[in-house]
Image (tube, rainbow, N blue to C red):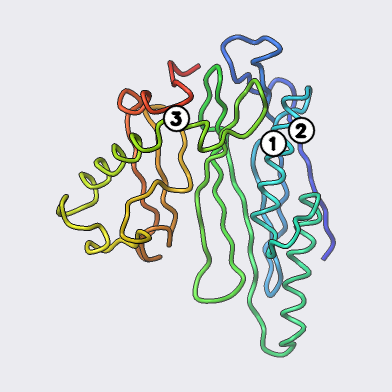
Amino acid sequence: MPLNMKKILLAAAAMLCLSTACDRNKTIETVDFEYIEPECDSCARTSLQYPVTAGKNRTERKINAALEKWVISTIELTSESLPSTVEEAVSNFSKGYQEVANDFPDDYHATWETSVQGEMCYQDEKLLAFCMETYSYTGGAHGYGSSHYLLFDKKKGALITREELIKDVDGFTALAEQKFREHYASDVNTPLNEQGFMFENDQFHLPDNIGFTNNGLKLIYNPYEIAPYSSGQITLEIPYAEVNAFLGYQVGSRS
């Protein structure tokens, strides 16, 4: 399958200033990246639509590099070594499909899919957050979709680690468990796994994905993370007034 990668840079008028103070240190412009293969039968199809920065300075280029690496990791089927570009990852995905199809030339009619859709979903003077939705299907009963937050320090241009985001993990985990039980547990004193959840060792833990919304910190448990696939995504949002004391990044008014 020919690979026609499209990188669409919108006009300057469409660029977004992600800070109230538009100085060199705080201004980050975004543009759209898009690659969509046409609908098909019995093939591998990739669809990518998400924002990237304009890459005008070192900070923006660092953000783009981290975004690209993350997207590559969602497309690549093996974890031995990641391709160096999104284009290479897309090509590898198509090759993987073709290898399986060649093994069953007469009766393999599935269509593989991989997709990433994203948007800039939060901003303030220090933070930049991208909300990314992924979907993958490579055969079987159903595909797998998941939600992810990519949090960046706008000054450093670096992904914010869990340790940087939450300075008091024990305190925040205790608060999150209390809120989780209030929202999802039928009995606040009964072990969670006896109520249909699948926490490892029956101990509450924070999800892999934590991010910012307009109103609070959002916790996202993707399918299979703490419950069966049929339960879908489980989310919990805690107001900033209750979580700021536990965070390494204090969230103020939204710009």
Is residue 124 shown to the viewer in this render?
A: yes
Disc 3 versus disc 1: distance between alpha carbons? 33 Å
Q: Residue 239 vs residue 211: left or right?
A: left
- What numbered label is drawn on residue 167? 3
Q: Are marks 2 and 3 in contact (CB under 8 Å)?
A: no
Secondary structure at badge 1 equals: strand
- Per the image, the residue denoted by label 1 is 32
Is residue 248 found left or right of 9 in the rendered image?
Answer: left
In percent of width and height, residue 30 lies at: 67, 28
Q: Residue furthest bottom?
A: 106
Q: CA distance from mark 2 to mark 1?
A: 6 Å
- Tag 1: residue type? Asp
Above or below residue 142? Residue 108 is below
> Which badge, 2 or 1, comes first in the chain's sequence?
2
Q: Which residue is mark 2?
A: 9
In the rendered image, the vertical position of residue 189 relative to residue 42, given as above or below:
above
